[in-house]
Image (tube, helix red, strand yellow):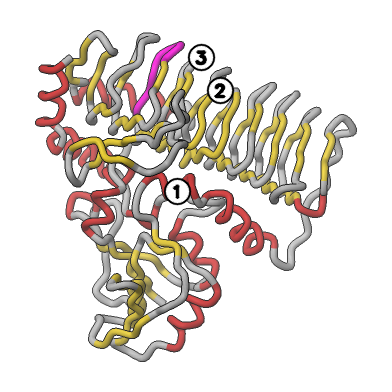
Amino acid sequence: MNILFFDEPALRKALLPLTFTRPAAELRIGIYTIREKWQQYFSNAHCFFKTEPYLQAKYPSTASAQLHINGCVCPNEHLVAEIEKLNEGEGLVHQGMVLASKGDLKKRVDYFQEVLVIRSPSDLFTHNGAEIRNDFKLITKDRTSCEITDKHTIVYNPSNVFIENGVSIKAAIINAEDGPVYIGKDVEIQEGTIIKGPFAACQGAVLAMGSKMRGDNTVGPYCKVGGEVSNTIFIGYSNKVHDGFIGNSVIGEWCNLAAGTNVSNLKNNYSSIKVHSYENDQLEDTGKIFHGLIMGDYSRCGINSMFNTGSVVGVSCNIYDSAFPPKFIPSFAWGSAAGFTEFRLTEAFDVAKKGMARRKVELAPEDIAILTHVFGAESQQRSLLTKTI
């Protein structure tokens, strides 16, 4: 079966900067990306994407998809069962939004049950704990966990912990009383790490010495994470190895948060937090009192960096200094609270290549083309930032 994940244009824009470099279905929430969740239900499916033209070289489309799925929709058993009942040309619609269809949509069928649709970056961390629980059931079904052999590691509620092959754990505390803990293949958990579920560490991730992993966290593939982390998703291949706090945040791929980086996720007066909207190009009230940092791919910050509540950092930014920078930093901006300049493409590519080489990954021509497009797409926003700082 061929599955075509399509991007709803309005939702895709609302999910920037994370969707500058990927279709919505490639966002991670819980243990899996949205695409990987659907593949658990349709195990033999070949996946394709209908997204922005500049992304299609890396994420190809197809004209022969038997199933079309909204890339912002997370599956559940009831939804999948209703999709399987559809006839050719029929599609499930929830509150006016198409969820999925068998082939091209010709007839709408109302779906009245609850469904998780990712409408903003904050939805990712808001629902991450619940999705870890859902994915844990899928990934552990009819399987047996590896044993924890380290005699200095303490585990609470071991029946709610699953360990894949190749995991190294030394003198850790794992508490799965309030939610499951999933430790993926070849994960390294260093001495003194404290983990509280729900929690997921995906393949090849490293938890640094003395890490404090509070609930509802996902450490994506090959990330290296330390310090104090709460209700945060690292999509993959990013670093936050040293001390410092981050909470209620989403960090893209190939990012680096240097030693002492701290992210505020709660205002002193407990008021709701405003976040930059790519749809309306202004700060909008989220209605949430907890909201940290949303950071696009390839961005990084220097030692002792600080981010205010509701900060949004675009793709391939370079931020330094210990003063709070603006709450919105457009892609390819370089600087601090004292001022910003443009991060030139050639320099950005060079930094990205060096960072990726440390994971033995190359910056592909498709990625260069994507970054070049994003550079041009945010040129006006960058010029406004450099004029106002």
Q: Residue 16: x, y in percent?
A: 28, 44
Is residue 44 inside the magenta stretch?
Answer: no
In-image side of 377 versus 181 (left or right) = left
Q: Residue 184: x, y in percent?
A: 64, 46
Q: Secondary structure at mark 1?
A: helix
Q: Which residues are magenta?
A: 299-305
- Pointer 1 or 2: first along the chain: 1
Identify the residue position indicated by label 3 in the image.
260
**CA separation, marks 1 and 2?**
22 Å
Q: Secondary structure at mark 2?
A: loop
Observer-side mark, 3 or 2, equals 3
In-image side of 38 versus 354 (left or right) = right
Q: Secondary structure at mark 3?
A: loop
Observer-side mark, 1 or 2, equals 1
Q: Note whether residue 231 is visible.
A: yes
Majority secondary structure of magenta residues: loop
- Pointer 1 or 3: first along the chain: 1
Tell me the crowding category of disc 3: few under 14, some 14 to 19, or many 20 or more residues within 10 angstroms, Cα based. some
Q: Amino acid at mark 3?
A: Gly
Identify the residue position indicated by label 1 in the image.
124
Do the numbered discs 1 and 2 sit on residues whose CB atoms are within 8 Å? no
Judging depth in this view, the residue of 140 and 97 nearest the camera is: 97
Q: Residue at x 26, y 63 (%)?
A: 50
Per the rendering, the mark at residue 241 is: 2
Q: Above or below — where is 347 with respect to 248?
A: above
Q: Residue at x 78, y 59 (%)?
A: 144
Q: Residue furthest right?
A: 151
Is the N terminus in the top left, top right, bottom left or bottom right quadrant? Answer: bottom left
Q: Residue 236: x, y in percent?
A: 47, 40
